[in-house]
Image (cartoon, coloured by chain):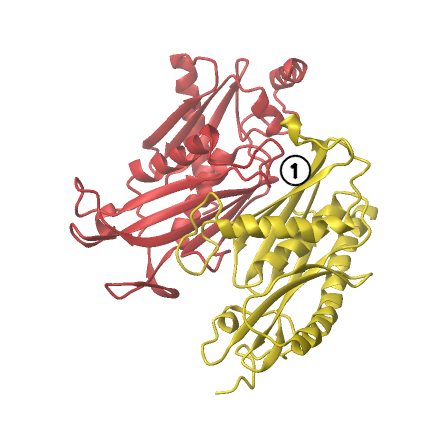
Chain colours: A yellow, B red
């Protein structure tokens, strides 16, 4: 059966419902929450702070450390064993690479900026939700940034190009599926995260990136609004 | 390092108030208990006491019983002091603080017999339900013990069994069958600083603790678990007073469930 209509009724270029809030973790230097459908991410930023052990320090610039973690009860299947997996380590790595281009850490030699991403609940698209939350948290921490980072998964389900795959689409059985998480710096349009599972033709991928950029501009607006809301409250 | 802060705290306590203006045995406000916050868990709750914010999720798994209790299910409590929640927490396997927290929460539930473990048995000697309770602090602004224990209980109260066909658990389908919570053990941590007793310490007060006693009690005031912590000893008179405070305050906290 061809994939003519999305399982949850959304338009093919439409994301799930998004909620975003900044300043949700008081003890952190910066923090944010980003929820897309049933995927829910928190990010906290600590730093720039002293980096120990000393041999990790870079005298030229501060370093960025990211950690992505699923809470043990965050998967719809069995409990996720705590302690990190190969998957979470890889996601931590690419998350750091997705965020680093917007930061200027040369002012903070020998220091570290720690980004901790925690997911209480997941249903597809969790690394992208984590990146969205983390970039808002970095801004909330008052770090100098060239841009925000916005991320979403794009993909192909059967013969349709879609934005923000949910679990049912990721595990679609009646046709092939490609899942492509993308992060961009919305102002420059440059891409900072690109991964792919599945099969797709090059021209389809290029079209999909354009489609993703449109959705990412909407996400960017939501992120900006959440940031402004926090600081608006302070002004009053 | 905290000597001056400690002296200041003690001076204030002697006048009957605390750094943030509270009375000695007053919890921060508001206390919020929200159940069912995490759809992927079989049960969940989020508890906020002042700025302290803790999430607890319950997962139910089918496993094998221990040989010495062939007709009983079991609980497993885990706590991770997420570095997201406190600048002093570090990544890595649970340290001694996290282990103590998990074990104190575990004992309150286990020893009060809040859950009848025999009701968690599916087939004696073969299959049982394992109730796995995970504690995840979001913001640690002090008193994780009481917040986690309250959240664990609220999450258990919220938990429903997933569908189980005798072979496999279908986590996509929750049944309407709830976990049977027979008692509500509440933990209250009473802190001794100088010769004064307080409850619900904030981060600054936690640094000034001489001794603490976590007291878990059920509805009728029966004690079901205790844990003494802190570097200083307690007299019998201290313990007498701390137990009274613990039992009294548990009644207050229980109203939030």
Q: Determine which quarter of the picture holds residue B29.
A: top right
Q: What percent of the width, then of the height, locates residue B54?
A: 53, 43
Question: Image height check: is B217 above or below A236?
Answer: above
Q: What percent of the width, then of the height, locates residue B230?
A: 48, 19
For the residue carrying disc 1, how many other residues have a C-alpha within 10 Å: few (<14), some (14-19), or many (20+)? many
Question: Image height check: is B60 above or below A217?
Answer: above
Query: In the picture provided, is A132 more to the left or to the right than A5?
Result: right
* Total marks in image: 1
Q: Residue at x 33, y 31 (%)?
A: B223
Q: In the rendered image, which residue does mark 1 sit on?
A: A27
Q: Residue at x 70, y 76 (%)?
A: A207
Question: Image height check: is A13 above or below B231?
Answer: below
Quick one: A170 or B121, which is closer to the camera? A170
Q: Residue at x 65, y 64 (%)?
A: A152
Q: Residue at x 72, y 66 (%)?
A: A216
Q: Determine which quarter of the picture holds residue B214.
A: top left
Q: Would residue A198 be seen by someone viewing this image from the given angle?
A: yes
Quadrant assignment for the N terminus of chain B: top right
Q: Element at badge 1?
A: loop
Query: In the picture provided, is B102 more to the left or to the right than B121?
Result: right
Q: What percent of the width, then of the height, locates residue A68?
A: 57, 48
Quick one: A138 or B186, which is closer to the camera? A138
Q: Determine which quarter of the picture holds residue B221.
A: top left
């Amino acid at each position: 059966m061809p994939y003519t209509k999305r399982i949850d009724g959304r338009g093919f270029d439409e994301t799930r419902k998004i909620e975003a809030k900044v300043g949700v973790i008081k003890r952190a230097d910066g923090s944010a929450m980003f929820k897309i459908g049933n995927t829910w991410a928190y990010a906290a930023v600590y730093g720039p702070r002293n980096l120990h052990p000393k041999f990790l320090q870079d005298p030229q610039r501060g370093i960025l450390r990211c950690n992505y973690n699923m809470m043990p009860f965050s998967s719809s299947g069995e409990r996720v064993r705590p302690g990190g997996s190969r998957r979470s380590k890889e996601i931590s790595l690419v998350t750091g690479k997705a965020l680093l281009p917007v930061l200027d850490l040369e002012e903070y030699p020998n220091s570290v900026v720690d980004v901790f991403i925690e997911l209480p609940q997941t249903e597809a698209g969790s690394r992208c939700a984590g990146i969205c939350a983390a970039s808002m948290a970095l801004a909330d921490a008052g770090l100098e940034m060239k841009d925000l980072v916005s991320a979403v998964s794009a993909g192909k389900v059967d013969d349709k190009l879609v934005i923000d795959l949910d679990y049912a689409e990721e595990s679609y059985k009646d046709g092939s599926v490609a899942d492509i998480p993308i992060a961009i710096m919305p102002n420059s349009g440059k891409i900072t995260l690109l991964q792919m599972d599945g099969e797709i033709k090059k021209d389809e991928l290029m079209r999909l990136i354009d489609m993703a950029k449109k959705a990412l501009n909407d996400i960017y607006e939501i992120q900006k609004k959440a940031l402004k809301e926090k600081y608006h409250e302070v002004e009053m | 390092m905290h000597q001056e802060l400690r002296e200041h705290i003690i001076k204030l306590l002697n006048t009957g108030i605390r750094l943030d203006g509270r009375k000695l045995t007053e919890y921060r406000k508001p206390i919020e208990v929200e159940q069912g916050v995490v759809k992927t868990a079989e049960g969940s709750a989020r508890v906020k006491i002042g700025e302290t914010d803790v999430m607890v999720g319950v997962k139910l798994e089918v496993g094998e019983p221990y040989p010495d209790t062939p007709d009983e299910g079991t609980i497993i409590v885990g706590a991770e002091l997420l570095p997201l929640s406190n600048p002093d927490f570090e990544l890595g396997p649970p340290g001694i603080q996290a282990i103590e927290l998990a074990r104190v929460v575990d004992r309150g539930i286990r020893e009060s017999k809040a859950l009848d473990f025999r009701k968690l048995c599916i087939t004696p000697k073969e299959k049982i339900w394992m109730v796995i309770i995970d504690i995840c602090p979001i913001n640690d602004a002090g008193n994780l013990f009481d917040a986690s224990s309250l959240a664990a209980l609220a999450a258990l109260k919220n938990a429903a069994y997933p569908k189980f066909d005798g072979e496999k658990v279908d986590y996509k389908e929750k049944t309407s069958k709830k976990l049977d919570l027979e008692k509500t053990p509440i933990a209250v941590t009473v802190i001794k600083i100088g010769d004064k007793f307080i409850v619900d310490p904030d981060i600054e007060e936690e640094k000034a603790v001489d001794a603490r006693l976590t007291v878990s009690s059920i509805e009728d005031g029966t004690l079901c678990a205790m844990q003494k912590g802190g570097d200083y000893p307690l007299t019998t008179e201290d313990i007498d007073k701390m137990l009274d405070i613990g039992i009294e305050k548990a009644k207050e906290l229980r109203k939030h469930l």
